[in-house]
Amino acid sequence: MKKAVVTLLLALSLATQAALPPATQPSYEQAFDKLAYNWSRTFAEVIQLAKKKHYQIADLEQSMIKAIDAFLTNLDPHSSFLDPKTYKSMLESTSGQFFGIGIVIDNTRKPKDKYLTIVDTILDGPSDKAGIKQLDKIIEINGEPLEGMSTEQATAKLKGPKNTTVHVKVLRENHPDLISFDIERDVIKEQNSMSFLIKDYDIYYISLNMFTENAVQQIEKLLKNSTQRPHKGLILDLRNNSGGLLTSAIDIASLFLDKGSLVVVTKDKTGKATEQYRTKRDPVANAQMPIFILTNNYTASAAEILASSLKSHAEEHAEKNATDKKALVFVVGTQSFGKGSVQEVIPVSNNCAAKITTSLYFPNNRNIQGEGITPDFIVERSLPPTEQMQWFTKHYGREKALQNAIKTGNQKDDPKAIPETPKKAARWTERAKEMLKTDNQLRETISLINLLQTFLNLCPDKVCNRSKAVEQLRNAHIGNDALDIEEIKL
């Protein structure tokens, strides 16, 4: 009996504890405040110890700035502290008064990295004209090494008054020495897209390196132009596009999606939707035009929002309208970066600001944060052979290159004996066309469009919506799919 009473009392005690109101449990805010107070006190103690004991404090202000920045950068990769100079430079860039050198940088860089990788150069911009190349690595700006420097600080140093010069040193693959450049800052032209017609296959191609207001107009012009002649599809190249204006991405989505379509939702830390962005105009694109979007690991932020939104709407349309040919959208290339976070820049004392991640983007209610977009057709980029490999192939990779090699009457004179005429510097668009000719991801996409067109002509029922089209194209296209090879023992 006593044992039963004890058990009952224990049960009542546990039930009473469980029934206590939430106010008796320490909330997240209370726990945060307690930890922050305890460690702030420790931080203050360390500062006082340094004041009393350190042999010579060279720059207390910089030490404090780096300490605050370390706290914010430890929260997530995109939160940081903006010192007065960096914050001022950021304000100037958003007010249209900034002048830069025209580069697209690697958004995966960490402060500990000793270099800043140039993903691409803006066409006809200062860096492009100076001779900076894709994948060059900046290791020094105006004599200051980049090790320990945040990306915001590095980009702030690259910006400045118009017609002033910034000195950079870069590492270049297959180049034995550092290369120095004096680049004159200038207005960065808003030519954010480049479009071509691939005549042999009747395919339109447009690349977009950043989302701006001007980019919307450029794509709209191309879509209207594309209606003037028959074509098999459109390739939208978002590789190396690190983002830009969210409003621009929404306006571009409006060119393809029905009016009122959901483009992206922002959600706070509780999962509550805080903002919804929908298309506000009628589309311009041909509703039945196949769209192939090229992505890579430098496709990020607004570029991912656009690609994910177009793809997810096509998926939903395929589920609801199984026999409707509308909205055939496919993604080709490699996994995108996966940046779906929203940062707010909040001014604080001492003319500084805190850049803090406050919410996440969900394109058409799909998550991209930390995951990115998985292509329907994975195609790894294979780069052209290096100069050394080309030289080796030319001099040792052919029988006719060997000394005293037997020659037949059909062989022509060695082209090495013919003096080469010096080439004039090609315009940026001409260079871009030459690069696209050796772009294997573009070629694979063209093959996919041709395959799709063949299916549409011969067996349209097999590609009547996006889901069926993806399945059919995967069966017919090898790409980078793993091969299951089994040995046959003879």
Image: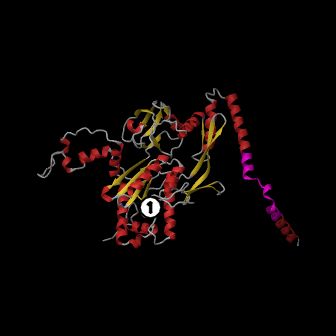
Indicate whether 405 appears above or below 366: above
Query: Nearest the camera: 222 or 420?
Result: 222
Q: Which residue is outermost to the right?
A: 2
Q: Which portion, as a residue range, is magenta?
A: 13-35
Q: Quadrant of residue 174?
A: top left
Image quadrant where one finds the C terminus = bottom left
- According to the picture, the residue beneath numbered tag 1 turns out to be 330
* Residue 95 versus residue 206 in the image, above or below: above
Furthest-top residue in this view = 56
Q: Is residue 424 magenta?
A: no
The colour scheme applied to this rendered structure is secondary structure
Residue at the spot 69% in from the left edge and 38% down from the top edge: 43
Question: x%, y% of residue 433?
Answer: 34, 48
Please name whichever residue, 149 or 305, is drawn nearer the observer in this view of the structure.
305
Residue 340 as seen in the image, left or right of residue 64: left
Give percent across and percent down for residue 442. Answer: 37, 55
Q: Counting other residues with Cα less than 10 Å from the Cα at mark 1, is it few (<14), some (14-19), or many (20 or more)?
A: many
In percent of the image, x 44 and y 61: which residue is there?
330
| Kind of residue at badge 1 | Phe
- Where is residue 262? Give x, y as percent: 56, 59
* Left or right: 441 as drawn, with respect to 345: left
